Image (cartoon, rainbow, N blue to C red):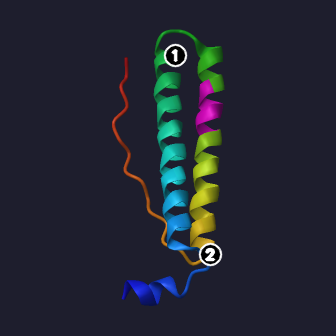
């Protein structure tokens, strides 16, 4: 069945795997920026927190571009798990 699914995509399996890995890296980076921004907000650093919220959004955009590219090419985009990020 996997071989049948593979014929419907223009992505080579190795490329698809690498793209899914990069999507996970971008998603993880977004979560880490969010955690840092939350810490800064709690501790009174609103301007710096605002900057990191923007960075988190940028990383999320990278993730979504890669994710959508994989699906547009007929590949299987894997939604990464959201690991817990240290808060302090």
Which one is in front, 26 or 1? 1
The relative height of residue 4 versus residue 65 in the rendered view (above or below) is below
Which one is in front, 11 or 32? 11
In the drawing, does residue 80 fall left or right of residue 11? left
Residue 38: x %, y % from top left: 48, 23
Which one is in front, 45 or 30? 30
Main secondary structure type of the part rendered in magenta: helix
> What residue do we see at 60% from left, 30% from top?
53
Q: Quadrant of the N terminus?
A: bottom left
Query: Does dot 1 land on a helix, a strand or a loop?
Result: helix
> What residue do we see at 44% from left, 90% from top?
4
* Crowd tier of the residue under label 2, counting other residues whose Cα lies within 10 Å: few below 14, some 14–19, many 20 or above: some
The circle on residue 40 is 1
What is the magenta range? 52-57
Residue 34: x %, y % from top left: 50, 31
Q: Which residue is mark 2?
A: 73
> What residue do we see at 37% from left, 17% from top?
88
Q: Quadrant of residue 19?
A: bottom right
Q: Earlier in the sequence, mark 1 or mark 2?
A: 1
Query: Does dot 2 land on a helix, a strand or a loop?
Result: loop
The circle on residue 74 is none
Q: Give the CA distance from mark 1 to mark 2.
A: 39 Å
> What residue do we see at 39% from left, 83% from top?
2
């Amino acid at each position: 069945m996997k071989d049948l699914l593979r014929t419907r995509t223009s992505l080579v399996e190795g490329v698809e795997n690498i793209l899914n890995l990069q999507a996970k890296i971008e998603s993880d980076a977004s979560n880490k920026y969010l955690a840092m921004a939350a810490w800064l907000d709690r501790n009174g650093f609103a301007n710096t927190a605002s900057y990191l919220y923007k960075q988190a959004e940028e990383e999320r955009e990278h993730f979504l571009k890669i994710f959508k590219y994989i699906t547009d090419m007929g590949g299987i985009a894997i939604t990464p798990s959201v690991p817990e990020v240290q808060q302090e």
